[in-house]
Image (cartoon, rainbow, N blue to C red):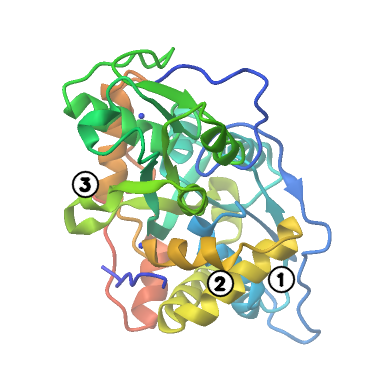
C-alpha cells in the first residue's frame, strides 16, 4: 500500500427545489464546464504516444488535489510528452460519467458513489477504476449553539451534498448505526437530511435553514469560518483512518486502445502525489492557484489552511472502503446489491508503482478477470 501523508486529512428532506446545483463534491448532476484555455501542448520532439490528446476531467475541489497540482505543475503533461492534455472541470459526478460514457472524456477524477453507479448502470461495460487519488477530507460541522453532542443531531436539519452521493451515503449509515430512522427518498425522519449543493450550504448555514452539514473540504472549513464547529471527522469512523474520497477512472475503450497513454497519466499522478506529500505547503499553494485559474478566485487562507491537512493524497484506491461504501448504499436502499467484480484494473498502476520502487496496491478482489 502506498503511503498517504496528510496534505498540510447518507436520505433526507429535500432542499428547496430552486436551489441551484453548482459545485458538488462526489455528487450528481450538472453540466461540465470546458476549460478552453487549459490544454497543455507539449514541445515538438517529445516522445510520441498512441493518442495525440487525452481528455481528463476533474472537480475544482481540494479532494481532487492530485488533478489540481498535477495539472498546475505540469507533472502529468511531462509524462505524456507529445500527447496534449485537454481538461474539463465538472460540477458533479453524473455529468462526468455521462461524458465518459458518451466518448467526450477519457480519464476522470471522481468519487466512489458515482463511480459505482456508473459501473453498475452500464453493467460493467464502460469504466474501470485505475488508481486512487485521495482519502479523507469529510467532516460534520454544526451550529454549536444548537448542537453540542452527537446525540443532539436528533431532530435537527443536517445537509449533505446530494441524495446518494458519497457523503449522503456515509451520513445515512451513521444515522442507522445510531438506531435512528430516516426515509432515504424524502430525507424525513429522526434527523432531517437536507440535500444541498455545496456552493449553497454556507449561505443556508448562515441563514439558519440548516443546523449543520456532513460535507467535504473546503465546504467544511467554510462553515467553520462562518461560526460552525467540527463535531466529527469521518476519518475517525474508518480503520486506519483511511477511506476513498477520490478515484481515477478511465473509459474501457480508451484503456484498451491507448494503454500507453493511460500508463503515462498514472506515472504523472504517482509523481504528483509524491511531490504533494514531500512539499505540502508548495502543493497547497499550487492547488489554490489552479482553483483560482478555474474559478477566478483563490480560497482564503482562513479556509484552505485548516482544510488542507484533512486530505491525504494516495495512489492506493483503498478498494475495501469502496466495497464498504457500496454496502452502505444498499443498506440505505439507495441502490440494489451491485456486482462490482471488474470495477478495478490496477495493472498499469502497479506497473508504475513497481518501476518507482513502491509496493503494489490491492483491488480487494474486485479486479477485472
For mark 1, give the secondary structure.
Answer: loop
Q: Which residue corresponds to the image point at 77% horizontal and 87% vertical from the top-left? A: 45
Residue at x 35%, y 56% (from the top left corner)? 317
Residue 331 quadrant: top left
Q: Which mark is residue 159?
A: none
| Mark 1 or 3, closer to the camera | 3
Q: Residue at x 26, y 58 (%)?
A: 362
> Observer-nearest residue: 95 or 254?
95
How far across and how far down the image is residue 336, in percent? 34, 20
Closer to the camera in the image, 164 or 171: 171
Do residues under tags 1 and 2 come within 8 Å of each other at their CB atoms?
yes
Q: CA distance from mark 1 to mark 3?
A: 42 Å
* 118 relative to 300 in the view: left or right: left
Dot 1 and dot 3 residues touching (CB under 8 Å):
no
Query: Residue placed at 72% from the left, 61% from the top?
Result: 297
Does label 1 or label 3 sit earlier along the sequence? 1
Q: Find residue 42 and report its horizontal and vertical position in percent.
A: 76, 78
User: Please, what secondary structure does the residue beneath circle 3 have?
Assistant: helix
Horizontal side of residue 350 vs 174, given as left or right = right
- Which residue reaches farthest front? 145
Image quadrant where residue 21 sits: top right
Mark 2 highlights which residue?
Answer: 264
The residue pinned by badge 3 equals 237
> Which residue is the site of mark 1?
83
User: Residue 367: x percent and y percent?
Assistant: 32, 49
- How far apart marks 2 and 3 lie (CA) works out to 35 Å
Q: SS for tag 2?
A: helix
Mark 2 or 3, closer to the camera: 3
Tell me whether the residue at label 2 lies in contact with that at label 3, contact meaning CB atoms closer than 8 angstroms: no
Amino acid at each position: 500500500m502506498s503511503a498517504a501523508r496528510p496534505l498540510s486529512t447518507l436520505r433526507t428532506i429535500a432542499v428547496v427545489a430552486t436551489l441551484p446545483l453548482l459545485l458538488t463534491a462526489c455528487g450528481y448532476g450538472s453540466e461540465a464546464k470546458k476549460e478552453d484555455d487549459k490544454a497543455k501542448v507539449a514541445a515538438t520532439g517529445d516522445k510520441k504516444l498512441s493518442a495525440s490528446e487525452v481528455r481528463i476531467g476533474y472537480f475544482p475541489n481540494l479532494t481532487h488535489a492530485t488533478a489540481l497540482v498535477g495539472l498546475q505543475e505540469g507533472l502529468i503533461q511531462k509524462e505524456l510528452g507529445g500527447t496534449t492534455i485537454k481538461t474539463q472541470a465538472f460540477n458533479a459526478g453524473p455529468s462526468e460519467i455521462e461524458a465518459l460514457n458518451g466518448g467526450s472524456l477519457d480519464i476522470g477524477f471522481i468519487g466512489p458513489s458515482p463511480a459505482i453507479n456508473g459501473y453498475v448502470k452500464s453493467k460493467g461495460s464502460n469504466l474501470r477504476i485505475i488508481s486512487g487519488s485521495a482519502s479523507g477530507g469529510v467532516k460534520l460541522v454544526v451550529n454549536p449553539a444548537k448542537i453540542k453532542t452527537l446525540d443532539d443531531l436528533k431532530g435537527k436539519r443536517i445537509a449533505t451534498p446530494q441524495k446518494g452521493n458519497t457523503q449522503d451515503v456515509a451520513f445515512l449509515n451513521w444515522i442507522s448505526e445510531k438506531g435512528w430512522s430516516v426515509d432515504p427518498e424524502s430525507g424525513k425522519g429522526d434527523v432531517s437530511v437536507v440535500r444541498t449543493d455545496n456552493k449553497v450550504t454556507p449561505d443556508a448555514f448562515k441563514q439558519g435553514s440548516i443546523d449543520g452539514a456532513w460535507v467535504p473540504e473546503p465546504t467544511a472549513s467554510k462553515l467553520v469560518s462562518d461560526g460552525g464547529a467540527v463535531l466529527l471527522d469521518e476519518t475517525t469512523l474508518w480503520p486506519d483512518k483511511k477511506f476513498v474520497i477520490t478515484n481515477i477512472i478511465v473509459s474501457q475503450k480508451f484503456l484498451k486502445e491507448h494503454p500507453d497513454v493511460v500508463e503515462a497519466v498514472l506515472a504523472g499522478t504517482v509523481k504528483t502525489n509524491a511531490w504533494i506529500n514531500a512539499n505540502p505547503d508548495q502543493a497547497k499553494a499550487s492547488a489554490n492557484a489552479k482553483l483560482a485559474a478555474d474559478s477566478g478566485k483563490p480560497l482564503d487562507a482562513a479556509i484552505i489552511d485548516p482544510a488542507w491537512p484533512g486530505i491525504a493524497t494516495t495512489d492506493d484506491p483503498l478498494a475495501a472502503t469502496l466495497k464498504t461504501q457500496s454496502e452502505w448504499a444498499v443498506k440505505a436502499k439507495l441502490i440494489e446489491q451491485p456486482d462490482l467484480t471488474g470495477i478495478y484494473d490496477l495493472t498499469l498502476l502497479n506497473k508504475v508503482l513497481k518501476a518507482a520502487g513502491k509496493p503494489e496496491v490491492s483491488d480487494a478482489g474486485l479486479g477485472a478477470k
